[in-house]
Image (spheres, grey):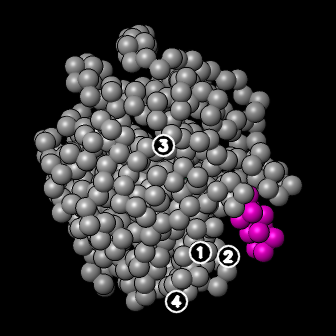
Amino acid sequence: MSYISTRGAAPELDFEATMLTGLARDGGLYVPRAVPVMTHDQIAALAGKSYEDVALAVMHPFIGEAFSQTAFRELIARAYADFGHPARAPLKQLAPGHFLLELFHGPTLAFKDFAMQLIGQMFQAALARSGQRVTIVGATSGDTGSAAIEAFRGLANVDVFILFPHGRVSDVQRRQMTTPSEANVHALAVDGDFDTCQALVKAMFNDHAFRDEVALAGVNSINWARVLAQVVYFFFAGVALGAPHRKVSFTVPTGNFGDIFAGFIAREMGLPIARLVIATNRNDILHRCMETATYERQGVAPTISPSMDIEVSSNFERALFWAHGQDGAAVAALMGELAQGGAFHLSENAMAHLRGVYASGRCDEAQTAAAIAATLAETGELLCPHSAVGVHVAETHLARDPATPMVTLATAHPAKFPDAVEAATGQRPGLPPRMADLFDRPERMTRLPDDLATLQALIRERIAA
Ligand SMILES: *Cc1c(COP(=O)(O)O)cnc(C)c1O
């Protein structure tokens, strides 16, 4: 299995190198040269299987020679062993035709654990084999960083540096990043928003001398291995609802477009997905792009669903690569326009492709709170604000296409965002018992300005120590 860049000008890599690299050297994102297709019978055979068995069947074709079937089965087993629910991703029914896929039973209570726990296992196995050491850097709007730190804390041959926007993540998110005491964990509070953090990370990757000097590796949602791990639960939920004999739609609370793009890969592999619905909060750049064919930055406004407060939606580039017939030069030109003028315009052909796969909707702050309250009243399910954005948008879509079952992805546990949930319902969600002492543990973090040189100096100093 070989991987190519969405901008068409980086070396082709195998799975292991793609995973260890993260961002391609031409600034693009790695994608498989050809997506393996599962037959109708192969998909039908997934029904009733455990999450781990589905994971093995769906992911192994992408891994090539990197891990044997037996070794990979072992890594998968370890990745999901600490989840707080035996189903790993339980599917609950909210209303006729509307289902909720709970992806928040991992160690940091957000769907990011599905990919990050597995990546931690895969990095460890690959680095142990080669004797290499790497420096992982990532930007986070809250959940990626905590999931990455949880997955890599204490591992040999790895330092993990996570940049988060100072004062813009929830207390639970921050504490999940600042309380691990292992020396290889570095939580960095940056003055700025998520896009500031992401731009710093991209700049470090594009500084090739620095990148080689410290052996940078990225585990942000741009890392292909993360997208791959997320493909699994689309199959897991799809077959539970009758695929491949029946079509299913998914609504995905979307920020960086990683999670929903995993759904696109599942669809390319043969899972009969009718629509992938992009659900945005009031930072609706993706929804506006779907409506107007123009992707245009207007600034980010903070919301009660902060993990989606993003306007440079990195993985959208992967969707654009498919929408332009895998023409890397065309994608590179669009990304150049975005960097220069803060916008790009999509052709009719590209829009026809996107609208054939995706639909979209937006949910403002009042609608988010109303969805949390209504879902609690009607079903007893307490939603986090991101999941509530999804449920609101899914309901609108379901009204248009009631015959196709809809699965909304519940991306975080309500206890990760207790203030917003309490304001909407009067109920304060409690942390699961396994992390009840989070607020008693000491915190450790470094405050940083938005300055590349300062950041690079800090990384050099810490990894030399
Ligand atoms: C990361 C995150 C999202 C957005 O996912 P993307 O893959 O970036 O689109 C939504 N909800 C929660 C809780 C998240 O942590």
Residue at disc 3, secondary structure: loop
Along the polypeptide, which appears first: circle 2 or circle 3? 2
Q: Amino acid at mark 4?
A: Ala
Residue 372 covered by magenta stretch:
yes
Residue 35 covered by magenta stretch:
no
Along the polypeptide, which appears first: circle 2 or circle 1? 2
Q: CA distance from mark 1 to mark 4?
A: 14 Å
Name the residue beneath numbered marker 2: 94
The rendered magenta stretch, by its main secondary structure, is classed as helix
Image location (x, y in percent) of residue 386: 61, 55
Q: Amino acid at mark 2?
A: Leu
Magenta residues (range): 369-383
Name the residue beneath numbered marker 4: 403
| Residues at circles 2 and 1 in contact by the CB criterion of under 8 Å | no
| Residues at circles 1 and 4 in contact by the CB criterion of under 8 Å | no
Residue at disc 2, secondary structure: strand
Q: Is mark 2 within 8 Å of ligand 1?
A: no
Q: CA distance from mark 4 to mark 2?
A: 16 Å
Q: Nearer the viewer, mark 2 or mark 1?
A: 1
- Binning the other alpha carbons within 10 Å of mark 3 as few (below 14), some (14 to 19) or many (20 upward) gives few
Identify which residue, 33 or 351, lies in the foreground: 351
Q: Residue at x 47, y 85 (%)?
A: 242
Q: CA distance from mark 3 to mark 1?
A: 25 Å
Residue at disc 1, secondary structure: helix
